[in-house]
Amino acid sequence: MELVRIYECLCDSTRLRLLALLGSGPLCVCHLQEILGEPQVKVSKHLAYLKERGLVEASREGNWMVYSLPAKPPRELAANLACLQDCAAEEPVFRRDAVALGKVRARLAKADALPCSARPL
């Protein structure tokens, strides 16, 4: 059943994009929303779905939620995430996300006051 649960989560393009982004490290919901260009409510809904199924973890930093991949992901998830990272470079949407992520991280590295308390790792 573990494998079925994981594949149910992976059958949505927004959730795949979120997992690919979180593969680079923890991110605040506001930054994920900015990168994806989707409404915050949609991003939060997908993150809640992934969290309920154990594919992401969340921690509160002040008023903001920061999401990350599990420290010890299930073997099936780890294998699929590795495949996703390998394939992401070939897909235009994942390449755009990576460019947007780089811009967000660069802006955060330069900023004295961040729009939220989430700091890049």
Image: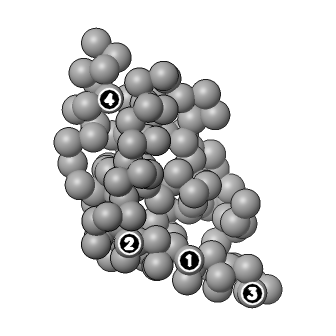
Q: Earlier in the sequence, mark 3 or mark 1?
A: 1
Residue ID for mark 2: 95
Q: In the rendered view, would you say 46 is above or below 4? A: below
Mark 2 or mark 4: whose residue is earlier in sequence:
4
Look at discs 2 and 4 and give the one toward the viewer. Answer: 2
Disc on the earlier residue, 1 or 4: 4
Residue 40 visible in the snapshot: no
Q: Residue at label 4?
A: 6
The structure residue drawn at horizontal position 73% and vertical position 60%, both measured from the top left corner, is: 121
Mark 1: few/some/many CA within 10 Å (<14, 14-19, 20+)? few
Element type at mark 1: helix
Q: Nearer the viewer, residue 29 or 21?
A: 21
- Residue density around tag 4, few if under 14, some if 14–19, many if 20 or more, within 10 Å: some
Give the spatial CA distance, label 3 vs label 1: 12 Å
| Quadrant in the picture for residue 117 | bottom right
Residue at 21% across / 48% down in the picture?
12
Q: Position of residue 109 (x, y in %)?
A: 73, 80
> Rounded to the nearest whole Å, what is the CA distance between mark 1 and mark 2?
11 Å
Residue 83, labelled with which disc?
none
Q: Is residue 76 left or right of residue 119?
A: left
Q: Nearer the viewer, mark 3 or mark 1?
A: 1
Mark 3 and mark 2 in contact (Cβ < 8 Å)?
Answer: no
